[in-house]
Image: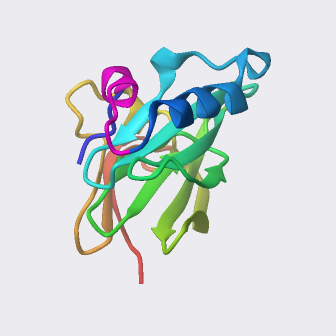
Amino acid sequence: MLLLNFVSAFLSLSTFAYPRQTEILEEIGEDFGFNLEQMRFIPNWNVYGFLLPTNFDATVWWYNGMNGERIGDTESTPVSANKNRIYVSQIKFDCDWRLDLHFCQWEGEYLYEFASFSDSRFNGEYLLMQDDGKGMFLGADNTLYILSYDYEKIGECYLKVQLK
Protein backbone atom coordinates (compact mmCIF):
# COMPACT_ATOMS: atom_id res chain seq x y z
CA MET A 1 0.00 0.00 0.00
CA LEU A 2 1.41 3.37 -0.96
CA LEU A 3 1.55 6.42 1.24
CA LEU A 4 0.44 9.33 -0.88
CA ASN A 5 0.29 13.10 -0.96
CA PHE A 6 -3.46 13.59 -1.07
CA VAL A 7 -4.38 17.25 -0.67
CA SER A 8 -7.37 17.13 -3.03
CA ALA A 9 -8.92 14.18 -1.18
CA PHE A 10 -8.70 16.02 2.14
CA LEU A 11 -10.12 19.24 0.74
CA SER A 12 -13.07 17.40 -0.86
CA LEU A 13 -13.93 15.12 2.08
CA SER A 14 -17.63 14.48 2.37
CA THR A 15 -17.29 12.10 5.31
CA PHE A 16 -17.15 14.93 7.83
CA ALA A 17 -18.27 18.53 7.71
CA TYR A 18 -16.27 21.34 6.15
CA PRO A 19 -15.90 23.19 9.48
CA ARG A 20 -13.86 20.26 10.85
CA GLN A 21 -11.39 20.55 7.95
CA THR A 22 -10.92 24.21 8.83
CA GLU A 23 -10.47 23.35 12.52
CA ILE A 24 -7.80 20.75 11.67
CA LEU A 25 -5.87 23.24 9.56
CA GLU A 26 -6.15 25.80 12.39
CA GLU A 27 -4.90 23.22 14.94
CA ILE A 28 -1.82 22.65 12.83
CA GLY A 29 -1.40 26.27 11.81
CA GLU A 30 1.39 28.01 10.01
CA ASP A 31 3.35 28.50 13.26
CA PHE A 32 4.52 24.88 13.05
CA GLY A 33 5.88 25.25 9.51
CA PHE A 34 3.20 22.97 8.08
CA ASN A 35 2.81 22.86 4.31
CA LEU A 36 -0.44 21.34 2.97
CA GLU A 37 1.55 19.76 0.09
CA GLN A 38 3.38 17.58 2.64
CA MET A 39 0.22 15.91 3.90
CA ARG A 40 0.21 12.10 3.85
CA PHE A 41 -2.72 9.77 3.25
CA ILE A 42 -2.90 6.03 3.83
CA PRO A 43 -5.73 5.06 1.45
CA ASN A 44 -6.79 1.68 2.86
CA TRP A 45 -6.91 3.14 6.37
CA ASN A 46 -8.59 6.44 5.41
CA VAL A 47 -6.11 8.28 7.64
CA TYR A 48 -4.49 11.66 7.02
CA GLY A 49 -1.09 12.65 8.39
CA PHE A 50 0.12 16.23 8.66
CA LEU A 51 3.92 16.54 8.70
CA LEU A 52 5.34 19.17 11.01
CA PRO A 53 9.05 19.58 10.21
CA THR A 54 11.77 18.93 12.78
CA ASN A 55 15.54 19.17 12.33
CA PHE A 56 15.92 16.02 10.23
CA ASP A 57 12.49 14.40 9.98
CA ALA A 58 8.96 15.35 11.01
CA THR A 59 6.37 14.88 13.70
CA VAL A 60 3.16 13.59 12.14
CA TRP A 61 -0.28 14.46 13.50
CA TRP A 62 -2.76 11.80 12.38
CA TYR A 63 -6.51 12.22 11.78
CA ASN A 64 -9.26 9.70 11.04
CA GLY A 65 -10.69 10.44 7.58
CA MET A 66 -14.15 9.23 8.59
CA ASN A 67 -14.82 11.63 11.45
CA GLY A 68 -11.89 14.06 11.58
CA GLU A 69 -10.80 12.97 15.06
CA ARG A 70 -7.11 13.17 15.93
CA ILE A 71 -5.89 9.61 16.52
CA GLY A 72 -2.28 10.19 17.49
CA ASP A 73 1.14 11.65 16.84
CA THR A 74 4.26 9.89 15.66
CA GLU A 75 7.86 11.07 15.55
CA SER A 76 8.77 9.98 12.03
CA THR A 77 7.49 9.96 8.47
CA PRO A 78 5.99 6.64 7.30
CA VAL A 79 7.65 4.77 4.45
CA SER A 80 5.51 1.65 4.10
CA ALA A 81 2.15 0.44 5.49
CA ASN A 82 0.10 -2.74 5.35
CA LYS A 83 -3.55 -3.73 5.62
CA ASN A 84 -3.11 -4.67 9.30
CA ARG A 85 -2.88 -0.96 10.14
CA ILE A 86 0.85 -1.12 10.81
CA TYR A 87 3.37 1.23 9.24
CA VAL A 88 7.12 1.52 9.43
CA SER A 89 9.33 4.56 9.19
CA GLN A 90 13.05 5.23 8.98
CA ILE A 91 14.35 8.08 11.13
CA LYS A 92 16.29 10.63 9.09
CA PHE A 93 19.67 11.93 10.21
CA ASP A 94 22.10 14.67 9.22
CA CYS A 95 24.72 12.22 7.93
CA ASP A 96 25.87 8.64 8.44
CA TRP A 97 22.35 7.27 8.65
CA ARG A 98 22.10 4.05 10.61
CA LEU A 99 19.11 1.79 10.16
CA ASP A 100 16.61 3.16 12.71
CA LEU A 101 13.12 1.75 12.13
CA HIS A 102 9.98 2.65 14.07
CA PHE A 103 6.76 0.64 13.87
CA CYS A 104 3.37 2.23 14.51
CA GLN A 105 -0.09 0.71 14.67
CA TRP A 106 -3.60 2.12 14.50
CA GLU A 107 -5.69 0.14 16.95
CA GLY A 108 -9.06 1.23 18.29
CA GLU A 109 -9.11 5.01 18.51
CA TYR A 110 -5.32 5.55 18.65
CA LEU A 111 -2.25 5.36 16.45
CA TYR A 112 0.93 4.74 18.44
CA GLU A 113 4.50 3.47 18.16
CA PHE A 114 4.84 -0.09 19.46
CA ALA A 115 8.36 -1.20 18.44
CA SER A 116 11.67 0.01 17.08
CA PHE A 117 14.82 -1.53 15.63
CA SER A 118 18.20 0.13 15.21
CA ASP A 119 21.52 -1.22 13.91
CA SER A 120 24.55 0.84 12.88
CA ARG A 121 25.84 -2.03 10.71
CA PHE A 122 23.23 -1.17 8.07
CA ASN A 123 22.56 2.06 6.20
CA GLY A 124 19.12 3.61 6.77
CA GLU A 125 19.25 6.13 3.94
CA TYR A 126 19.83 3.47 1.28
CA LEU A 127 16.22 2.20 1.34
CA LEU A 128 14.88 5.73 0.77
CA MET A 129 17.10 6.29 -2.28
CA GLN A 130 15.28 3.66 -4.36
CA ASP A 131 13.07 5.38 -6.95
CA ASP A 132 11.33 2.14 -7.92
CA GLY A 133 9.62 1.68 -4.54
CA LYS A 134 11.64 -1.47 -3.79
CA GLY A 135 13.56 -0.05 -0.84
CA MET A 136 11.09 -1.33 1.73
CA PHE A 137 7.98 -3.51 1.72
CA LEU A 138 5.77 -4.40 4.70
CA GLY A 139 3.73 -7.49 3.85
CA ALA A 140 0.30 -8.53 5.12
CA ASP A 141 2.01 -11.13 7.35
CA ASN A 142 3.85 -8.25 9.12
CA THR A 143 7.16 -9.21 7.55
CA LEU A 144 9.32 -6.27 6.54
CA TYR A 145 11.77 -6.53 3.64
CA ILE A 146 14.43 -3.81 3.45
CA LEU A 147 17.04 -3.03 0.83
CA SER A 148 20.09 -1.74 2.69
CA TYR A 149 23.85 -1.45 2.58
CA ASP A 150 25.89 -3.67 4.92
CA TYR A 151 28.98 -1.80 6.13
CA GLU A 152 30.69 -4.99 7.36
CA LYS A 153 30.23 -7.00 4.15
CA ILE A 154 30.61 -3.85 2.04
CA GLY A 155 27.66 -4.44 -0.23
CA GLU A 156 23.95 -4.23 -0.88
CA CYS A 157 21.73 -6.64 1.02
CA TYR A 158 18.10 -7.42 1.79
CA LEU A 159 17.02 -7.67 5.40
CA LYS A 160 13.95 -9.49 6.63
CA VAL A 161 12.33 -8.37 9.88
CA GLN A 162 9.41 -10.39 11.28
CA LEU A 163 7.00 -8.61 13.64
CA LYS A 164 5.19 -10.81 16.14
Q: Residue 43 falls in which quadrant of the image?
A: top left
Q: Is residue 80 a member of the stretch shown in magenta?
A: no
Q: Is residue 80 above or below residue 10?
A: below
Of residues 52 and 109, the one drawn nearer to the viewer in this rendering: 109
Q: Residue at x 32, y 26 (%)?
A: 12
Q: Is residue 151 visible?
A: yes
Q: Position of residue 85 (x, y in %)?
A: 37, 64
Q: Quadrant of the C terminus?
A: bottom left
Residue 151 is situated, as x and y percent measured from the top left of the image, at 51, 44
The residue sitting at 74% across, 28% down in the picture is 54
Q: Where does the image place residue 41, in percent across and percent down from the top left?
A: 38, 38
Residue occupying image coordinates x 53% and y 39%: 77
Residue 130 sits above or below residue 69 on the image: above
Displayed quadrant of residue 131:
top left
Q: Is residue 9 magenta?
A: yes
Q: Is residue 38 above or below residue 81?
A: above
Q: Is residue 68 left or right of residue 70?
A: left
The magenta segment: 6-15
Tell me, yes or no, if residue 149 can be seen here. no
* Residue 118 picture location, percent across and down: 61, 58
Comparing 54 with 62, the one in front is 62
